[in-house]
């Protein structure tokens, strides 16, 4: 319709909904506590947020106490090395794992693998237990291609690995009886009478 027809239609609708003699809604008394106040319109989605003072924001922050520390606490002089996740999972499942994973070479490779995996941020899905799955770093639960069997380690390296091995079986909850048995086993080897035979005994 034309502009004049539209205006005429609007007037007709107005007169029909507002017959003469009846009060208009704005002329009716407003309820107490809300006199003359129209309902607030929601803010436009593109409208800028209302200004908030820094003091107001600080008042809304939860009250926290400053951190405390003990200046007499001893700090380790070296960072503890963690073996590969593959070796840790084997220990937690009470399964055999080569002692190479607890040697210096194995610990160093595990640290480098973790750093590469964190940089790549690659995850894989594996079965954690019956009916359950879990996410883990890709290739973190696979055997190392550089792993050596126990008989390929020198005696010095083998006795070095037993310290880390004992620590992690204890952390895995093997119990004092098993940990003490392995500790006694390594002690017997380290003090065996064949040591008196020199290189042949080694």
Image: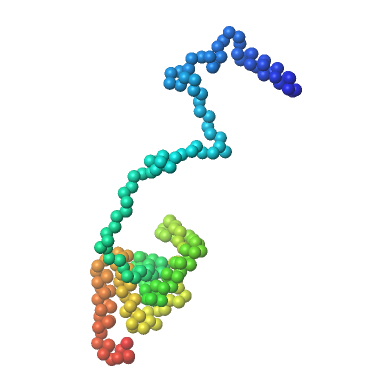
Q: Position of residue 180 (x, y in %)?
A: 24, 72
Locate the N terminus and report the quarter of the image it occupies: top right
Q: Is residue 194 above or below residue 158?
A: below
Residue at image point 37% right, 68% down: 82
Q: Is residue 193 above or below residue 52?
A: below
Q: Position of residue 165 (x, y in %)?
A: 33, 72
Can residue 79 be seen here? The reply is yes
Quadrant location of residue 84?
bottom left
Residue 15 or residue 194, whichever sits in front: 15
Locate the C terminus and report the quarter of the image it occupies: bottom left
Q: Position of residue 200 (x, y in %)?
A: 32, 91
Find the residue positioned furthest to the right.
Answer: 2
Question: Relative to residue 70, is residue 31 drawn left or right?
Answer: right
Quadrant location of residue 70?
bottom left
Can residue 165 be seen here? The reply is no
Residue at image point 28% right, 74% down: 182
Residue at image point 44% right, 40% down: 53
Residue 103 or residue 58, whichever sits in front: 58
Q: Position of residue 46 (x, y in %)?
A: 57, 38
Question: Relative to residue 44, is residue 113 drawn left or right?
Answer: left
């Amino acid at each position: 319709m034309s502009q004049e027809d539209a205006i005429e239609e609007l007037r007709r609708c107005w007169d029909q909904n507002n017959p003469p003699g009846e009060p208009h809604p704005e002329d009716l008394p407003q309820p107490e506590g809300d006199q003359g106040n129209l309902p607030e319109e929601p803010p436009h989605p593109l409208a800028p947020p209302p200004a908030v003072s820094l003091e107001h924001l600080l008042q809304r922050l939860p009250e926290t106490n400053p951190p405390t520390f003990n200046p007499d606490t001893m700090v380790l002089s070296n960072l503890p090395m963690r073996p590969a996740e593959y070796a840790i999972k084997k220990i937690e499942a009470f399964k055999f794992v080569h002692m190479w994973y607890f040697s210096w070479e194995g610990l160093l490779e595990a640290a480098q693998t973790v750093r590469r995996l964190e940089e790549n941020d690659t995850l894989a899905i594996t079965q954690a237990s019956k009916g359950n799955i879990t996410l883990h770093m890709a290739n973190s639960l696979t055997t190392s291609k550089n792993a050596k069997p126990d008989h390929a380690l020198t005696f010095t390296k083998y006795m070095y690995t037993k310290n880390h091995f004992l620590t992690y079986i204890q952390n895995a909850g093997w119990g004092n009886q098993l940990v003490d048995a392995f500790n006694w086993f390594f002690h017997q080897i380290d003090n065996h009478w064949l040591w008196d035979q020199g290189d042949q005994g080694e």
